[in-house]
Image (cartoon, grey):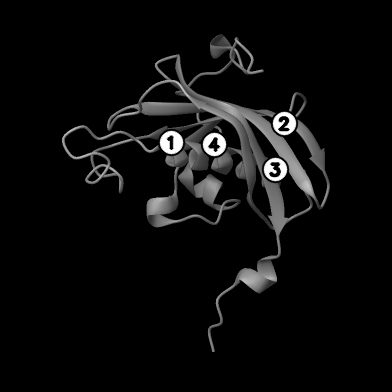
Amino acid sequence: MPRKEPIVPFDSYDLANIVADQEEIRRFNPQRYEMEQLTAIVLEDDQRYACVGYKDTSMDDFWVRGHMPGMPLMPGIVMCEAAAQVASYFALKYDLLGAEVVGFGGLDNVRFRGAVRPGDRLVLQLARLKARRSAIIVCEFQGYVDQTRVVEGEIRGIPLPLSSLREETS
């Protein structure tokens, strides 16, 4: 059952106090171009295993033109991808899996409760529920626009074998 209160109280972080910008996020997450779904990280709590980041949306986002014409809404799976990128960043930075890359392992109990439109800031709160080194990390997440919850669920991350994923260059 999803929790009623925010994972991280709103007054315990400041959206203007950036802990990691896009360049710092790129040190840990491999996504680039249209697939980068994080603008900044504003809280890292390695004692409670919690992290807060956000995605600033705009009319230039790849999904705006086609989802849906005349009333653009951020697709739910893109909201989940943004949450996955917060989880990946946190798991890699704090070496929670012993992996070089973290991939999607699954989603559970996901609920969409509101819309994200171009110009909105999607704030993503995340907390680790459990982790098994070299196997899996499970986190709960919540997404907010103006402190109104728009998405929530559980996300699983798994270590990916980096060497077998790299493109052949020869």
Q: Quadrant of residue 137?
A: top right
**Real-space CA distance between mark 3 and mark 2, rounded to the nearest whole angstrom:** 9 Å
For label 4, the crowd category at 10 Å Cα-Cα, with few meaning under 14, some 14 to 19 and many 20 or more, is many
**For the residues marked 1 and 2, what is the alpha-carbon distance in whole angstroms?**
21 Å
Tell me the kind of residue under disc 1: Gly
Real-space CA distance between mark 4 and mark 1, rounded to the nearest whole angstrom? 11 Å
Would you name the residue on which mark 3 appears?
91
| Label 4: which secondary element | helix
Kindly check if marks 4 and 3 are in contact, taking CB atoms under 8 A apart as contact: no
Q: Is residue 129 above or below residue 26?
A: above
Dot 4 or dot 1, earlier in sequence: 1
Q: Which residue is rendered at x = 27% and y = 33% of the image?
A: 118
Q: Position of residue 165 (x, y in %)?
A: 62, 69
Look at discs 1 and 3 and give the one toward the viewer.
1
- The residue to which callout 2 is attached is 128
Give the mark nearer the N terminus: 1 vs 3: 1
Give the alpha-carbon distance from disc 1 to disc 3, as whole Å: 23 Å
Looking at numbered disc 4 in the image, what kind of residue is underneath it? Ala
Mark-to-mark CA distance, 4 and 2: 12 Å
Q: Earlier in the sequence, mark 4 or mark 3?
A: 4
Query: Number of labelled discs?
Result: 4
Residue under pointer 4 = 83
How many other residues sit within 10 Å of disc 1, few (<14), some (14-19) or many (≥20)?
some
Location of the N terminus by quadrant is top right
Mark 4 or 2, nearer chain start: 4
